[in-house]
Amino acid sequence: MYAVMKITLTKPFILRCFLVCLFLSLPFLFFYLLFPQQQQPFHHSVTTKDLTIRPGYSSYQSYIQRQLNKTLNPRLRKIWTTRDWDRKIPVFARFFNDLRDKNLLRNTSKALCIGARVGQEVEALRRIGVADSVGMDLVPYPPLVVEGDFHNQPFRNDTFDFEFSNVFDHALYPQRFVAEIERTLKPEGVCVLHVALSRRADKYSANDLYSVQPLVELFNHSALVHVRTVDGFGLDTEVAFRKNGPTHHHHRL
């Protein structure tokens, strides 16, 4: 009888403790609701000796906005569709012809150009006979370029035979950039990157690359098949990887 009475008497005390705890937690709850934390869609890349991520982005949204500031710049878009259009397409066509001569590209390839802006690379591919080609950028430019984020490509697995990009330096998350390429490439598909090793890229770049080795480590489901020096509008090195075939055991190179 005494034990039952003791339990009954402690109920108001437990209730008071609960109410006090609830009252003390209310300021934290209101702060969380009013000021939600910015969520990053991916983990930050690990900075190494030969690949460094530039600081200064408070959120993924601020990074995207900075990239859009360049992509939507009216002056630049006019240059890309006029003076640069006539100047760059023949150069891209020569690059792609050389890759075709090395059996890294075929006329029957289904090709993607990543970060294609207004589609100069796509037009070059189509002019040399790679008809099934499309570009991807944050801002679409029909019919050559569709909308997409290279950190999260809007394509299914094993879609393309060939992917080209000269915007690796704009990737805030290089691991994710490469992972999406390997995901959307078909087995034995080829990825070609133009990168800057001997000079720093432009002010919109999100990373700095100092050697090919970080790329070899990032493409851990592919084999390095080709490296050469190029003059690619400020980019000096061409690097090509071939995705492992379906029977190949994936391992880091």
Image (cartoon, helix red, strand yellow):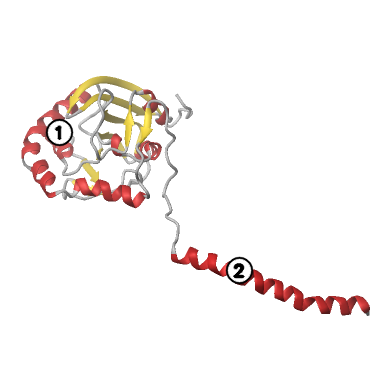
Q: Is residue 163 above or below residue 238?
A: below
Question: Which of marks 2 and 1 precedes in the sequence?
Answer: 2
Q: Which residue is mark 2?
A: 24
Residue 83, image quadrant: top left
Q: Quadrant of the N terminus?
A: bottom right
Q: Quadrant of residue 95?
A: top left
Point out the residue furthest to the right here.
Answer: 1
Count numbered badges in the picture.
2
Between circles 1 and 2, the one closer to the viewer is: 2
Please name the amino acid that badge 2 sits on: Leu
Left or right: 17 as drawn, with respect to 166: right
Q: Position of residue 97 (x, y in %)?
A: 17, 26
**Residue 45: quarter of image:** top left
Q: Amino acid at mark 1?
A: Gly
The residue pinned by badge 1 equals 129
Between residue 115 and residue 45, name the one nearer to us: 45
Which of these two is toward me, 43 or 140? 43
